[in-house]
C-alpha cells in the first residue's frame, strides 16, 4: 500500500508516427472538440496511453493564441511551433499536465483501506471519492468606469473542463461563476511615483483574502472544499496595479495563490488615449491570458 514511506515511479515511452488516413479526416473537423470526438474512435485505448496529435502551425482547429487543446479521452492537439527540440519540450510538458503526479497518487491512495477489511456498514457510509467546488469570480469595484465582459463559460469548457474530466475518476467537481460589483481588496495599494503605478507588496497579500472572501458567498452548505479563482479589475483611481514579490520585483503574472483556497489575478485596464472618452469603458477580458494563470494555480 502507498504511504508516506513509499513512492511512485513513472516511466514514459514516446513513439512518433504519421497520422492514418482516418485520423486525417477527423483532423479536418470544424472545431477541436469535434475532432477530439472523432479521434476517440480511432486512438489507442491501452491502459496508461496518451495520444498527442501535432497539427500544423496554420491549423484552424486551435483558436489564435492557443497552442494546445486537451481532449476528454486522453488525447490532445498540439500546434507545431519551433523545431524538433521545442516540440519535444512541449510534449514533455503536455505529458506531465495530462498525467497524475506521484504526490497526487500517493495522497489519493495512502488512506484507502482494502475492501476486505471493512464491514458492510463501513462500506455503506464510505464516500467513493473526494470532491471540490470551483468558483470563478470577476470582481469589478468600479462599474461606473469599467464595463467588463468575460466569456467565462466558453473558457471553462475549453480550458478547465478537459482537465476536470481527466480527474473525474478520483474526484467530483462542480464549477460556477459570478460577478461581484463594488468589491474591493480591503488593502490600500501604495503609489509609486517612479513608475506612476500602484503596488501591492508580498507581505500585504495575506490581508487581501479575508475581506474578499466575505463577498464571495458562504460555502457552509457545501459538502466539498471550495477553490476560489478571482479576477480583479482595479478601480480607475488605483490603475495600473501590480503585485510585488518578497524582493520587491514585479510578479510576471500579476497574480498570487493561497494553498487550499485558490488564487487572485489583477487585470489592469489600459488608460484611454483620449481625455474625452466616455465612461464606462468597455473591457473585453483576454481569457487565454487569464486561464493560463488560473490553470497553473489549479494544479
Image (cartoon, grey):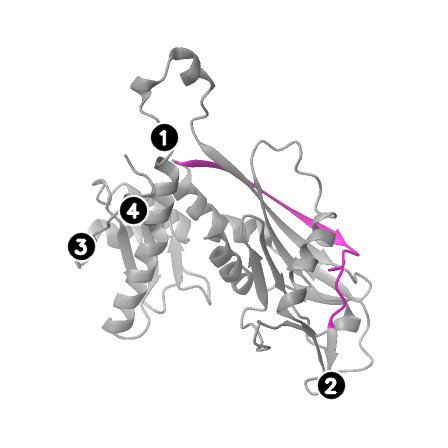
Q: Mark 1 points at which residue?
A: 112
The reply to whether callout 3 and callout 2 are in contact (CB within 8 Å) is no
Marks 3 and 2, how far apart in space?
Answer: 54 Å
Q: Looking at the rendering, in which quadrant would you find the N terminus? A: top left
* Nearer to me, 120 or 176: 120
- In three-dimensional space, the C-alpha distance between marks 1 and 4, rounded to whole angstroms, equals 35 Å
**Mark 4, residue position:** 39
Callout 2 crowding tier (Cα within 10 Å): few <14, some 14–19, many ≥20: few
* SS state under label 4: helix
How many marks the image carries: the answer is 4
Residue where numbered disc 2 is placed: 193
Q: Determine whether, in the image, residue 88 is placed left or right of residue 105.
A: left
For residue 18, which numbered disc appears in the image?
Answer: none
Which callout, 2 or 4, points at the residue further toward the start of the chain?
A: 4
* Lower position in the chain sequence, tag 1 or tag 3: 3
Circle nearer the viewer, 1 or 2: 1
The mark lying in front, picked from 1 and 4, is 1
Instruction: Return the residue nearer the eye: 103 or 32.
Output: 103
Range covered by the magenta-colored residues: 170-189
18 vs 267, nearest the viewer: 267
Name the side, left or right, on which 74 lies relative to 296.
left
Which is more toward the observer, 58 or 196?
Answer: 196
**Sooner in the amino-acid sequence: mark 1 or mark 2:** 1
Give the residue number, with chain letter if any, for mark 3.
13
Amino acid at each position: 500500500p502507498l504511504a508516506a514511506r513509499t513512492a511512485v515511479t513513472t516511466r514514459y515511452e514516446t513513439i512518433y508516427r504519421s497520422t492514418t488516413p482516418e485520423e486525417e479526416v477527423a483532423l479536418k473537423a470544424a472545431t477541436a472538440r469535434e475532432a477530439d470526438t472523432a479521434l476517440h474512435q480511432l486512438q489507442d485505448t491501452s491502459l496508461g496511453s496518451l495520444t498527442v496529435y501535432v497539427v500544423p502551425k496554420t491549423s484552424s482547429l486551435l483558436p489564435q493564441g492557443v497552442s494546445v487543446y486537451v481532449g476528454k479521452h486522453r488525447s490532445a492537439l498540439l500546434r507545431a511551433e519551433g523545431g524538433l527540440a521545442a516540440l519535444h519540450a512541449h510534449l514533455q510538458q503536455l505529458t506531465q499536465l495530462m498525467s497524475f503526479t506521484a504526490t497526487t497518487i500517493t495522497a489519493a491512495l495512502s488512506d484507502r483501506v482494502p475492501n476486505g477489511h471493512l464491514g458492510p456498514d463501513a462500506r455503506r457510509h464510505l464516500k467513493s471519492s473526494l470532491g471540490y467546488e470551483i468558483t470563478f469570480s470577476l470582481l469589478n469595484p468600479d462599474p461606473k468606469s469599467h464595463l467588463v465582459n468575460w466569456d467565462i463559460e466558453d473558457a471553462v469548457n475549453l480550458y478547465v473542463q478537459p482537465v476536470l474530466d481527466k480527474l473525474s475518476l478520483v474526484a467530483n467537481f462542480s464549477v460556477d461563476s459570478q460577478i461581484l460589483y463594488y468589491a474591493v481588496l480591503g488593502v490600500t495599494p501604495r503609489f509609486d511615483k517612479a513608475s506612476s503605478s500602484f503596488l501591492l507588496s508580498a507581505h500585504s497579500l495575506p490581508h487581501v483574502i479575508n475581506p474578499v472572501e466575505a463577498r464571495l458567498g458562504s460555502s457552509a452548505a457545501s459538502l466539498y472544499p471550495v477553490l476560489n479563482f478571482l479576477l480583479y479589475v482595479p478601480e480607475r483611481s488605483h490603475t495600473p496595479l501590480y503585485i510585488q514579490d518578497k524582493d520587491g520585483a514585479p510578479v510576471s503574472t500579476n497574480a498570487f495563490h493561497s494553498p487550499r483556497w485558490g488564487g487572485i489575478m489583477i487585470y489592469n485596464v489600459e488608460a484611454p488615449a483620449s481625455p474625452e472618452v466616455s465612461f464606462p469603458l468597455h473591457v473585453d477580458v483576454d481569457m487565454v491570458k487569464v486561464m493560463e494563470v488560473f490553470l497553473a494555480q489549479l494544479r
